[in-house]
Image: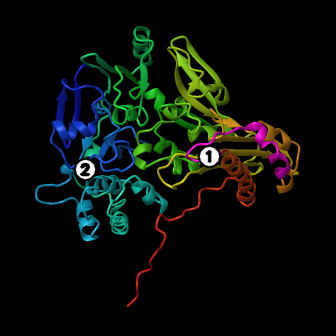
Amino acid sequence: MDTLCFWVNGNMVEEKGVRPTTTLLNYLRETLNLTGTKEGCAEGDCGACTVAIIDPHAEGGARFRAVNACLVLLPMVQGKEVVTVEGLQTGQHYHPVQESLVQALGSQCGYCTPGVIMSMFAACYRNDLKEPWQIDDQMCGNLCRCTGYRPIMDATQEIAGKCPDDRFQEALQNAEARSMELDYSHGEQRYFNPTTFEQLWDILDRYPDARFVVGGTDLSLEITKQFKEPQLLVSLEGIKELRQLANQAGHWHIGSGVLLSDLEAASRHGLASLERMLRFFGARQIKNRGTLGGNLCTASPIGDMAPTLLSLGAQVTLRSRAGTRQISLEDFFQGYRQTALRQGEILDSVQIPDFPVEPAQIRTCSYKVSKRQELDISTVSAGCYVHLDEQDRVVEARFAFGGMAATPARASHVERALVGQVWTEANLETALAFLKQDFTPMDDHRGSAWYRHKVAGNLLRGFLLETRKDPHPRLPYRPTATVVLDEVQS
């Protein structure tokens, strides 16, 4: 298809006259005149541009996903249904989410309100909100410049998970998985969205240097912040095989196109260290677009997924027209922002092997250290794994770090110093003397080399202590509010 076709607030839109690098935010505001959706930061941090998109492929049935319209390129909504704040009202009646925020006095200057409303709207139709931290996670990507967080959270807690029987619930029940196939061009720009591997290989034969895009949470920043517009983009979002996520007898297969929010939900059942890292990976809107493959293929030294996966002994499958090959994730990272991908090859999936022994003999955990709890880049991140025998001697250790070198890497000298030793604080202290042989971190605005070394050592100390009672600890819930008020009894 060479025409963009999608739905906004129930109305079909067909478009052939805009650049494929046009963001959904700008199109809503400038072409459709839906100016309720605001631009704040243009980089996915503030949430003022939040809209909801129906995802018919979600596990357990279609759902609304809150996303940052400033990072979604228009071709990314091919075949999809978009809901903006203007589409919530039915006749003269406001949506219960809107009424809830009004009653809680959660709107002040009003600039952030549309984005807040749309994140609340997505929460309203979620049926998986079982734990208190999930409300914080749902709303952490929305900033309120007037600091009206308490009434916003009160309103969100009131409405979350209500799933009213209305036209939006009906839209979810009738959601169609329409084809995203697309060959769209405007001027010298071109955007492909193949839906099969054969289509993809044919495109790459003609355009071997094309850039790949899936969620766009990283690449779109080049457009919104650096004002660069790629001339040729090939999306992998339409290839359903890349979205496969399966756990068979403890062995995990994770497609490179799996959304991070879906991976977070799945990892609660057997991958506690991965769940911990994903909790503060980014805002819900970012996790609803970002993919595991996108995070790994940037080969960033501070990419949050890599340390945890390295500690779990992950393998990656690379695919091309010639077939597939499998290598360790450690070998996938070749240097700063460099991977083992060859021309015409994509990251197909990640495999996490089953534990070699009973889980009680394994210790796993992950850590992210940043200046803010929410929405921040890591200064140091870590994934930790030890396999102990029945005498608590270390059979195998894998300690992987981000922010310590040009690529995510393991502390191999520390690991070797521990193998065969009893897993004690004293032996760990002895092994930590080798940490400086493993890493020579740089000084930058996030932390000095001394600080990074100190933090890395402290994380390993904390790992030993934290896993004494629970070998695979989940992240403890710490409310975003510093003060929790009980209701006054009259």
Q: Quadrant of the N terminus?
A: top left
Q: Residues within 10 Å of mark 1 (few under 14, many from 20)?
A: many
Q: Residue furthest top?
A: 206
Q: For the residue labelled by badge 1, is the local secondary structure a helix, a strand or a loop?
A: strand
Residue for point 44% across, 77% down: 485
| Any part of residue 417 in sight | yes
Q: Residues within 10 Å of mark 2 (few under 14, many from 20)?
A: some
Q: Are marks 2 and 1 in contact (CB under 8 Å)?
A: no
**Quarter-of-image position of residue 123:** bottom left
Placement of 347 over or under 472, stated as above or below: above
Q: Quadrant of the C terminus?
A: bottom left
Q: Which amino acid is tagged 2?
A: Phe
Front residue of 401/229: it is 229
Q: Earlier in the sequence, mark 2 or mark 1?
A: 2
- Is 379 magenta? The answer is no
The residue where tag 2 is placed is 168
Left or right, residue 237 beside residue 53: right
Placement of 434 over or under 191, stated as above or below: below
What's the magenta region?
A: 428-448
| Any part of residue 312 in sight | no
- The dot on residue 129 is none
Front residue of 350/425: it is 425
Q: Which amino acid is tagged 1?
A: Val
**Quarter-of-image position of residue 186:** top left
The residue where tag 1 is placed is 380
| Real-space CA distance between mark 2 and mark 1, rounded to the nearest whole angstrom | 42 Å
Residue 362, position as x, y percentages in the image:
75, 47
